[in-house]
């Protein structure tokens, strides 16, 4: 068993772990197409999550998540880089040749228990539910 | 420094840099400074091997002739790449001059083609009713743009980015970088903090004032040429400007299609001997400034323009056109007809990463230097040096530090490392990993590892866990007995090297089509496919070791990989092991 996948709480979950958990949830529990080439909706979701300060279980990293105000929509460089990282390192695959959608890689999905962070914090679990709902709404 | 009134960390860095320059170079920046000593010609010519012959103004020459810029002569633009490409010895000074030339050419091209729009934009910014002084303002903006280009890399230290990665860990700079990011409304790094704050130092202002009094026009000294506003210069260095109408000036200095990139792509490849090109003439022929939205949901831009005392601002409230408040500003962009230029830029950048910046020997040399500098910082801290003093050490250091230390007695990890680098006795790869190395259940474990070590928040901790396991294994061997794990790793030249794939944010841009409408550049050519191929076949996670310890490190690294990644299959390790023959 690897040392990487760990128990996460709202206090210590990182953006990377949050994103991995979210794409696994979106793939598993909701019939939704996750965009890849045009990242605007991803940034919109994360900006909305950052703004949802009163939502219980909102992870602490959102307080420090920085958005660039340099274009037609708020853009988080860290989010963009990590989405690319998931693609470039085989965690997600994208539809060819259009590159417009991403899916969790088949091999990763089959061995999901190896890679899914373990949520022990019930408020964080609820926040994931809230995030998934928001993503489904925006991606549709 | 009214610009920094509400930014204490940036103000502090500026004050410290000012004091540093005054103490270090009193003849140029101190109380009794007398340089520039002789009268100055209004313009001087410099020849550049890439761009040809260009002239430089008295102000540019006055700044260029200070030790602040002259030290860049002794800092290699591409760090230790000359260990692999012997001719890649061009300096940060050459690059800074090149960026000045390129920025100037881009500005001139825009001013030529969009003269009317530029005059209208300037009239709004400076609240000018008549046309009379518009031309003077445009000339002044051009001078400020050129000065920003000249100063944009002034904070670099020995071997460029290798040392930047080390001094960026200093708390004073990390905090200032956060503040600068708040100020700019976009993420900024420590290198930009230094260049931005240098531009705002009062001693630089004084130098320019002194120089202005020395300029000779037609044999007469003391005529008053244009005054450069260093606050505008500082804003352009961080990719901003004092008004949304002038945002394209910030874009010329720091954006995805900036003059910095236009210069380094050609200069780095030409110096390395790689025949990579893009169509610079088409770039200059097509580049334009166009109105575009800049949303401002957290009021970052409102504060910025407030600090810059911008007039005639038109902030549109959130509504139908955008869910956030926004400004419309002139942005530098390339139209769709110049798509092939963008494509060439992306290919050039990818090739440079592949052949130069991510070359295994270049990574080995720079990784070793980083570890030596980390150890140097620890040593300075042990000797009760403050972070400011450590930063000053970096601001003083050039590449000569390595060469001068390499000849001395090998009594520290720095001098031993310097000896190895200078004589090219570098670590070699013992393992290298990429996403394409695993299939089936192993793939999920490897993908999880490769993504987790690149997680900004937890990645460093995971790398440290990995290295500590490897180092503790090492200390069990006879060559490393009694050492701590970090010391053992340093002796063995062993570390986990995590390179970052290049990003191509320029392809997130939309390009305007002739006749109207816009399209995202990444939809026009297969950049994601190229990136994926690059990550699979070029962008590796590597484990290094000195040749004499490679077998020992191989064993220890395998123990660490099994524990951290969780893959047990020996066939996988055979596949990712690097063999000499």
Image (spheres, helix red, strand yellow):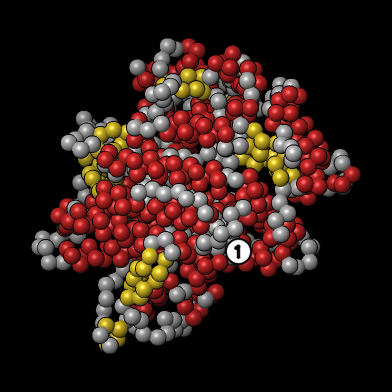
In this view, B401 is above or below A31: below
**Front one among B254 and B547:** B547
Q: Where residue B228 appears, x then y in whole percent?
A: 31, 68
What residue is at 38 percent from the left and 37 percent from the top? B507
Q: Image quadrant of residue B218?
A: bottom left
Q: Image quadrant of residue B263?
A: bottom left
Left of B117 or right of it: where is B260?
right
- The N terminus of chain A lies in quadrant: top right
Instruction: Residue lying at the far left in this picture: please name it.
Output: B130
What residue is at 73 percent from the left and 28 percent from the top? B573
Left of A75 or right of it: where is A6?
right
In this view, A132 is above or below B89: above
Q: Where residue B199 appears, x then y in whole percent?
A: 41, 64
In this view, B25 is above or below B496: below
What residue is at 22 percent from the left and 44 percent from the top? B291
Q: What element carries label 1?
A: loop
Query: Would you say residue A89 is visible in this rendering?
Result: yes
Q: Where residue B305 appears, x then y in whole percent?
A: 29, 52
Instruction: Residue lying at the far bottom in this picture: please name it.
Output: B219
Dot 1: chain letter: B
The residue that disc 1 covers is B399
Query: Would you say residue B184 is visible in this rendering?
Result: no
Q: Where residue B489 appears, x then y in whole percent?
A: 76, 46
**Front one among B342 and B562:** B342
In this view, B556 is above or below B549: above
Left of A11 or right of it: where is B251?
left
- Local packing at callout 1 (Cα closer than 10 Å; few below 14, some 14-19, many 20+) is some
């Amino acid at each position: 068993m690897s040392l990487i996948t760990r128990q996460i709480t709202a206090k210590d979950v990182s953006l990377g772990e949050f994103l991995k958990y979210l794409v696994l949830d979106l793939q598993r529990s909701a019939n939704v197409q996750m965009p890849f080439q045009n990242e605007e909706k991803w940034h919109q979701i994360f900006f909305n999550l950052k703004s949802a300060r009163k939502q219980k279980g909102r992870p602490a990293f959102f307080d420090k998540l920085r958005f660039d105000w340099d274009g037609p929509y708020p853009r988080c460089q860290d989010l963009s880089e990590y989405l690319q990282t998931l693609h470039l390192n085989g965690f997600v695959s994208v539809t060819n040749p259009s590159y417009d959608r991403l899916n969790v890689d088949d091999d990763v999905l089959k061995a999901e228990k190896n890679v899914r962070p373990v949520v022990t914090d019930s408020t964080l679990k609820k926040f994931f539910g809230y995030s998934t709902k928001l993503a489904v709404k925006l991606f549709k | 420094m009214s610009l920094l009134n509400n930014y204490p960390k940036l103000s502090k860095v500026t004050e410290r840099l000012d004091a540093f320059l005054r103490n270090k170079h009193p003849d140029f920046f101190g109380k009794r400074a007398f340089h520039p000593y002789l009268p100055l010609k209004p313009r001087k010519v410099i020849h550049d091997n890439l761009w040809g012959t260009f002239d430089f103004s008295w102000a540019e020459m006055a700044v260029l002739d200070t030790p602040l810029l002259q030290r860049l002569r002794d800092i290699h633009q591409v760090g230790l790449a000359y260990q692999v490409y012997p001719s890649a010895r061009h300096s940060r000074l050459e690059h800074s001059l090149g960026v000045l030339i390129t920025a100037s050419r881009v500005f001139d091209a825009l001013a030529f083609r969009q003269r009317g729009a530029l005059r209208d934009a300037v009239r709004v910014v400076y609240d000018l009713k008549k046309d009379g002084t518009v031309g003077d303002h445009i000339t002044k903006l051009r001078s400020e743009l050129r000065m920003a280009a000249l100063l944009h890399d002034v904070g670099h230290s020995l071997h460029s980015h290798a040392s930047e990665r080390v001094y960026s860990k200093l708390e004073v700079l990390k905090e200032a970088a956060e503040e600068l990011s708040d100020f700019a409304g976009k993420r900024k790094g420590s290198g930009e903090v230094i260049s931005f704050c240098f531009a705002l130092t009062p001693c630089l202002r004084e130098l320019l004032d002194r120089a202005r009094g020395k300029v000779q026009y037609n044999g007469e000294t003391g005529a008053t040429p244009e005054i450069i506003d260093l606050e505008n210069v500082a804003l352009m260095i961080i990719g901003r400007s004092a008004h949304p109408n002038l945002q394209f000036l910030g874009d010329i200095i720091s954006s995805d299609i900036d003059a910095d990139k236009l210069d380094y792509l050609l200069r780095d490849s030409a110096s390395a001997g790689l025949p990579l090109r893009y169509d610079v003439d088409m770039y200059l022929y097509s580049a334009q400034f166009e109105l575009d939205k800049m949303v401002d949901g957290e009021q970052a831009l409102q504060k910025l323009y407030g600090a810059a005392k911008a007039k005639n601002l038109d902030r549109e409230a959130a509504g139908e056109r955008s869910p956030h408040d926004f400004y419309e500003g002139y942005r530098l962009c390339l139209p769709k007809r110049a798509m092939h230029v963008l494509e060439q830029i992306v290919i050039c950048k990818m090739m440079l990463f592949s052949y130069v910046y991510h070359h295994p020997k270049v990574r080995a040399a720079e990784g070793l230097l980083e570890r030596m500098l980390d150890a140097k910082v620890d040593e300075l801290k042990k000797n009760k040096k403050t972070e400011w003093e450590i930063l000053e050490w970096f601001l003083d250091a050039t590449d000569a530090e390595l060469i001068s230390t390499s000849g001395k007695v090998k009594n520290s990890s720095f001098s031993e490392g310097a000896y190895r680098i200078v004589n090219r006795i570098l670590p070699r790869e013992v393992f290298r990993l990429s996403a394409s190395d695993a299939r089936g259940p192993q793939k999920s474990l490897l993908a999880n590892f490769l993504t987790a070590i690149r997680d900004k928040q937890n990645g460093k901790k995971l790398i440290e866990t990995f290295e500590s396991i490897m180092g503790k294994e090492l200390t069990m061997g006879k060559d490393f007995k009694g050492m701590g794990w970090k010391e053992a790793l340093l002796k063995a030249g062993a570390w986990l090297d995590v390179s970052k794939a290049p990003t191509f944010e320029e392809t997130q841009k939309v390009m305007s089509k002739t006749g109207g409408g816009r399209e995202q550049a990444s939809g026009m050519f297969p950049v994601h496919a190229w990136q994926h191929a690059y990550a699979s076949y070029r962008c590796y996670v590597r484990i290094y070791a000195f040749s004499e310890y490679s077998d020992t490190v191989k064993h220890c690294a395998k123990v660490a990989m099994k524990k951290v990644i969780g893959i047990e299959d020996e066939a996988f390790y055979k596949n990712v092991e690097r063999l000499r023959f």
